[in-house]
Image (cartoon, grey):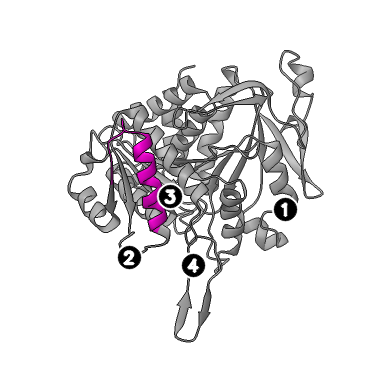
Amino acid sequence: MLIAGLEGGRLQSLGHLAGGGESEHRKHPHRAPPLPVHGGLLRGRVWHHRLTGRRAEILDSVIRMALIPGDGVGPEVMAEAEPLLDWIRARGRRLEVLRLPYGADHFLTTGETLPESVFQDLRDGCDAILFGAVGDPRVPDGRHAEEILLRLRQGLDLTVNFRPCRPLPGVGQAGLHIEVFRENTEGPYGLQGSTEPGRAVDMAVHTEPAVRRLLEAAFAGAAARGCALTLAHKANVLKHGHGLWVRVFQELCAAHPQVPARGMHADILLCALVQDPRSFGVIAADNYLGDLISDLTAAFAGGMGTAPSLSWAPHRPFRCAALAEPVHGSAPDIAGSGLANPVGMILSTALLFRHLGWKPEAQAVEGAVAEAIGRGMKTRDLGGSLSTADMGTAIRSHLPR
């Protein structure tokens, strides 16, 4: 696996295997040499995403992916996803990997969260990011987590956060297939508020371009599946922000008459979701409501440990336009214990593979997860006894060679 490192606060392509030695291109001249870190777009490849229906010309056939394991259980679950990158390279996919150190340990040692120079290199020199988790009690204000993860989501304009709920064999409620499309860059997250004696203020901002991009992706997702779309909102009380959501939603309903669509007040939706989850196909929501709803749907599929997510920018303003991460957080209380479930991380990797156009490999990974769990191989949160590493090994044993 090709690795890159940091030098002088910038990403530097090392151009060799992590253990040192001969150049990857020199050893394998049939492969393209590593891309430079700075500048340029990928050449000679066509992107297509089933959920957006968009095609974009991309300029090179080598995919550059950044790995940020982060904090808590993040490095542990990432360690079970990384072998999938070796596996997919062995199947002929051309992939260059950059492993980055950003998280609480790095912040406490250096004072750095995500340097602007590195962010720019990720934005302009990578295609996708595979992310573990951030959050550490040693940084009580969560500054580093906000400046890393929210910076990536908002700085890369990753409007769409896609969170599917598909229970695995013998886990959760069988037969469900719910997809939550959550707006990922606006709402109340990451905005400055204020606190004074006896009074606290948080703000939420919604813009029509972001709302429209999220809803267009949700309509495309519902159309692709032939299922209904539900908008979660509280426009009855949040008349300005959620009023904008309802207005754009109604416009798109008229533009997509083939998609059964309805709006529901979020409190009523949550009640209906608990009582009859099979009545939902695709749910669209703003950042805050989407966060809550997708955590509930994760419970239907076995819990947070199994839930994947993919964030992407449908309008592709930068080269780096996708970030995959498990829905679960850093879980510092179980970090280092081997109790974390790597399934969410592994399924997030599969989502990223599919987004990059590697559908056969995505299906193979998802099938390996289902096969392992169907054979009773489970971590403790699912009623089994396997450790994080053992679960990863069990899943990989079912991958095609």
Q: Amino acid at mark 3?
A: His
SS of the residue at dot 1? helix
Nearer mark to the viewer, of 3 and 2: 2
Residue at image coords 76%, 14%: 29
Q: In the displayed structure, would residue 108 be above or below residue 69? A: below
- First in residue order: circle 1 vs circle 4: 1
Q: Earlier in the sequence, mark 2 or mark 1?
A: 1
> Foreground mark, 1 or 3?
1
Labelled disc at residue 203:
4
Q: Dots 1 and 4: beta carbons under 8 Å?
A: no
Q: Residues within 10 Å of mark 3 (few under 14, many from 20)?
A: many
Mark 3 residue element: loop
Answer whether labels 1 and 3 touch (C-beta < 8 Å): no
Left-right relation of 377 to 310: left
Q: Which residues are magenta?
A: 242-262
Looking at this rendering, what residue extends furthest in the bottom direction?
197
- Residue 139: image tag: none
Q: How dense is the environment of label 4, judged by Cα within 10 Å: few (below 14), some, or many (20 and up)?
A: few
What label does residue 328 carry, if any?
Answer: 3
Marks 2 and 1 sit apart, C-alpha to C-alpha, by 39 Å
Task: Confirm whether residue 173 shows in the render.
Answer: yes
Q: Which one is earlier in the sequence, the residue at label 1 or at label 3?
A: 1
Residue 57 within the magenta-colored segment of the rendering? no
Q: CA distance from mark 4 to mark 2?
A: 15 Å
Alpha-carbon distance for marks 1 and 4?
A: 25 Å
Foreground pick, 91 / 205? 205
Q: Would you name the residue on which mark 2 appears?
A: 237
